[in-house]
């Protein structure tokens, strides 16, 4: 066996994953099964995203890997180091410099462009699992576009708590047909998915599923016609490090005092640099 | 010339087949022919067991006829044979054009007398208020005490039950009313009130076929009579009485 | 005509070309002597008009529940056609609802037809509140405004004479009779044209049974839908229905006005059935 294949995976595996990706792109929001390979990290640690990245990466790519918006977290660093070691591609923390971004639980603050691909690591690809455990029935419901049961969850939250209680993994309707799980990104990021210039790919390694949102696709959160979709409210809050407002914040509690920092560390760094230059 | 016939019964016969008695056949009645006009009352007479009730039930399709036909002249001018028409047609007719006042009141024990009587009016779309007030008037007219209005009629005496039954049958009178011994268990006074009610219905153009035993009563309300003499014999003589 | 069932059969097993001839009430068996298939429903023809109430009676195993499930397409028929409510294709040809694509079947079941099961667990989703169950059908029939959905749920909670404060309680928290009421509310909340009831009050206390039957009758008079009710209890049939169908060994042995079936039954089996009333 030749152990020095480009991008770790053998060519057959990459071909199979690319085929699944093509199907996923052709049917936005539709879940495509794939034969998830053994990876040098355990399943559940981003192997879905990793396999997609490894299947589509080319020498000219610039890679960025983030975990909850952070380039420097252990998992992001390890995945990035692994990919660069098996491909030799450049990596960067800078969103605009990257052509391929693998992410867990966030979309970068900086607007993505049409030459960029965003690869999401997905723990639970099937949005219907919470309301319908039978996979055959799930398929039928997707086929019929019958998402009444998801709407009922929304109804129950609205009637009992005033609004949806879902803080992340908020169900989205893709291209007016399939409802899909956007991975555990915050509600804040949901509107960013809509009509995005970048290609968005989703990989669930443990669950062996791939799905996708092509660039400029209609993506809407599931919401009642007479109710607003409310994202996290950070009004009056600025980043303690860079002073940024209107971004998604991480809350850090020290004693009984809360501090807020940009969740997107690359964005925070860039702001700080701008502030220092000024 | 307007045809004012309401119902024509021609050569009607009924035989019951009892499969649990090895297919034993019992004749209910045979060769029954009569007709009744709008605004007229035909009295069915004859001894008990002669098949009078069976004839009414056969017209109402509670019994299936074995032979003959029953031509019903509908409001829309069409003639419907009640023997061969579909169940759905009969149901429509029962809802709109044909009513049956049974000999005994059959109601659920949780429905009050007032509700019982008002029901037919509510069915034809009358408002609750008017239906109940009309029902109360009618019960009062028939001498039911007001304190009984909100009690189930099943707790009433036989005569009271019958009056409730008649009130229900005539409150929203259909074009043809079948009356199974409407005055059988009534005292003179109540019976009189009921007969007056029936006279009033005739004036409204309602056709009726009723079972009566009392010759005086027949003479008072019936325009014609048909004597049912029993299953073996047949009688086709229609005693025509001059129009009232 | 609302419902037109033509020559519908349901055979379990290998089935041969003699199954239908060798079974049924005449043959006095439901199992084909040639191939041992079970003929649950044998060449049934049945129609129902708008606003009509049909009862189906027959002994256990006569196929009455199966017939109901075939109409509701909980199970698929072996042969035959069912036309429903003038449903036709673009060219005006009547559509056999047994051949509809699954998406149209769901739509039919979500809106035009409803089923009330003997076991509330089949008709209710126990993960959803009472209001949520009702909401599911309102949503399924296309409503996407929260206020309308909530209003609709409250309205039906009110119609089944239940305290509106219980709308957000879950099915486990209700008695059997109340669960049946919630099933009724759910079934009717899409204003169906046809309500199918499979032994709706069997197993309930007589007092509860009477109240539920009265409620069904009242709602039918108010809303004007058609009903087909399966019951082995002739009292229930007598109380509720206009027309009665008698089944034996998967065949229809008698069809008539309910008072006629009870007072002048024609078929030997119907005579036996009626003579068995306590």
Image (cartoon, coloured by chain):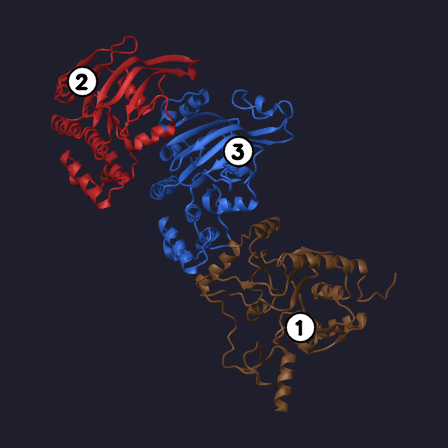
Residue A208 visible to an observer of this rendering: no
Q: State the separation of the CA atoms marked 3 and 1.
A: 57 Å
Chain painted red: B
Residue B193 position (above or below residue A164): above
- Residue A224: x percent and y percent? 47, 61
Residue C265 or residue B219, whichever sits in front: B219
- The subunit carrying tag 1 is A
Residue A84 or residue C239, whichever sits in front: A84
Marks 3/2 in contact by CB < 8 Å: the verdict is no
- The subunit carrying tag 2 is B
Q: State the separation of the CA atoms marked 3 and 2.
A: 52 Å
In the picture, measured across the screen, residue B198 lies left or right of residue C95, that is left
SS for callout 3: strand
Q: Which residue was labeled with disc 2?
A: B224
Shown colour of chain C: blue
Shown colour of chain A: brown
Report the quarter where the N terminus of chain B lies. Answer: top left
Residue A196 or residue A241, whichever sits in front: A196
Labels 3 and 1 positioned on one and the same chain: no
Residue A201 position (above or below residue A110): above
Report the quarter where the C terminus of chain B lies. Answer: top left
Depth check, mark 2 against mark 1: the one in front is 2
Q: Which residue was labeled with disc 3?
A: C81
Marks 2/1 in contact by CB < 8 Å: the verdict is no
- Residue B132: x percent and y percent? 21, 42
SS for callout 2: strand
Q: Which residue was labeled with disc 1?
A: A67
Depth check, mark 3 against mark 1: the one in front is 3
In the picture, measured across the screen, residue B224 lies left or right of residue A180, that is left
Q: Which mark is residue B74?
A: none
- Residue A41: x percent and y percent? 75, 66
SS for callout 1: strand
């Amino acid at each position: 066996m030749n152990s020095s294949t480009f991008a770790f995976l053998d060519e057959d595996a990459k071909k199979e994953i690319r085929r699944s990706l093509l199907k996923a792109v052709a049917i936005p929001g539709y879940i495509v099964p794939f034969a998830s390979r053994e990876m040098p990290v355990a399943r559940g640690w981003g192997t879905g995203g990793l396999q997609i990245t490894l299947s589509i990466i080319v020498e000219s790519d610039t890679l960025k890997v983030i975990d909850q918006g952070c380039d420097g977290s252990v998992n992001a660093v390890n995945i990035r180091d692994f990919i660069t070691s098996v491909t030799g591609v450049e990596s960067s923390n800078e969103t605009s410099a990257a052509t391929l971004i693998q992410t867990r639980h966030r979309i970068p603050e900086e607007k993505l462009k049409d030459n960029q691909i965003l690869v999401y690591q997905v723990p639970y690809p099937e949005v219907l699992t919470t309301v319908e455990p039978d996979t055959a029935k799930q398929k039928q419901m997707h086929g019929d576009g019958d998402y009444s049961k998801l709407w009922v969850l929304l109804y129950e939250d609205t009637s009992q708590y005033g609004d949806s209680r879902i803080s992340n993994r908020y169900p989205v309707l893709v291209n007016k047909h399939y409802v899909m799980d956007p991975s555990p990104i915050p509600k804040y990021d949901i509107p960013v998915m809509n009509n995005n210039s970048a290609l968005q790919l989703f990989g669930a390694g443990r669950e062996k599923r791939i799905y996708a949102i092509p660039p400029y696709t209609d993506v809407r959160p599931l919401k009642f016609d007479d109710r607003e979709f409310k994202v996290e409210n950070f009004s009056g809050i600025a980043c303690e490090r860079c002073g940024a407002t209107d971004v998604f914040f991480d809350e850090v509690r020290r004693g009984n005092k809360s501090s807020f920092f940009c969740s997107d560390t690359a964005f925070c760094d860039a702001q700080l640099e701008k502030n220092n230059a000024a | 010339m307007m045809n004012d016939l309401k119902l024509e019964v021609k050569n009607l016969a009924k035989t019951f087949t009892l499969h649990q008695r090895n297919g034993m056949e019992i004749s209910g009645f045979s060769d029954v022919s009569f007709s009744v006009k709008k605004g007229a009352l035909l009295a069915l007479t004859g001894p008990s067991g002669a098949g009078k009730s069976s004839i009414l039930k056969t017209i109402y399709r509670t019994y299936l006829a074995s032979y003959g036909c029953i031509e019903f002249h509908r409001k829309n001018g069409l003639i419907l044979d009640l023997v061969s028409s579909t169940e759905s047609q009969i149901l429509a007719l029962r809802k709109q054009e044909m009513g049956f006042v049974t000999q005994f009141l059959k109601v659920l024990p949780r429905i009050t007398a007032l509700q019982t009587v008002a029901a037919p009016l509510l069915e034809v779309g009358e408002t609750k208020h008017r239906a109940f007030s009309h029902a109360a008037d009618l019960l009062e007219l028939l001498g039911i005490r007001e304190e009984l209005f909100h009690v189930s009629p099943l707790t009433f005496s036989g005569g009271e039950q019958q009056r409730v039954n008649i009130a229900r049958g005539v409150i929203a009178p259909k074009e043809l009313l079948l009356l199974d011994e409407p005055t059988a268990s009534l005292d003179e006074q109540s019976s009189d009130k009921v007969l007056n009610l029936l006279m009033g219905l005739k004036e409204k153009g309602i056709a009726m076929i009723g079972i009566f035993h009392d010759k005086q009563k027949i003479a008072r309300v019936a325009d014609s009579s048909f004597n049912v003499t029993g299953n073996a014999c047949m009688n086709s003589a229609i005693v025509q009485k001059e129009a009232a | 005509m609302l419902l037109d069932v033509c020559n519908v059969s349901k055979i379990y097993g290998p089935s041969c070309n003699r199954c239908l001839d060798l079974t049924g009430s005449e043959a006095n068996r439901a199992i084909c002597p040639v191939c041992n298939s079970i003929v649950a429903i044998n060449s049934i023809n049945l129609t129902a008009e708008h606003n009509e109430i049909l009862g189906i009676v027959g002994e256990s195993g006569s196929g009455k529940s199966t017939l109901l499930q075939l109409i509701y397409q909980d199970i698929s028929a072996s042969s035959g056609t069912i036309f429903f409510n003038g449903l036709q294709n673009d060219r005006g040809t009547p559509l056999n609802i047994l051949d509809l694509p699954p998406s149209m079947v769901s739509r039919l079941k979500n809106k035009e037809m409803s089923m009330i099961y003997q076991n509330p667990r089949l008709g209710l989703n126990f993960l959803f509140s009472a209001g949520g169950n009702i909401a599911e059908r309102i949503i399924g029939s296309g409503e996407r405004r929260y206020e309308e959905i909530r209003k609709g749920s409250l309205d039906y909670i009110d119609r089944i004479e239940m305290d509106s404060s219980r709308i957000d309680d879950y099915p486990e928290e209700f008695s059997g009779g109340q669960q049946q009421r919630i099933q009724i509310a759910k079934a009717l909340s899409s204003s169906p044209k046809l309500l199918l009831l499979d032994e709706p009050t069997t197993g309930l206390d007589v007092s509860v049974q009477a109240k539920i039957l009265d409620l069904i009758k009242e709602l039918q008079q108010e809303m004007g839908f058609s009903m087909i009710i399966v019951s082995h209890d002739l009292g229930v049939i007598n109380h509720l229905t206009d027309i009665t169908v008698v089944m034996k060994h998967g065949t229809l042995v008698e069809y008539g006005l309910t008072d006629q079936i009870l007072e002048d039954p024609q078929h030997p089996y119907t005579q036996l059935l009626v003579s068995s009333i306590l």
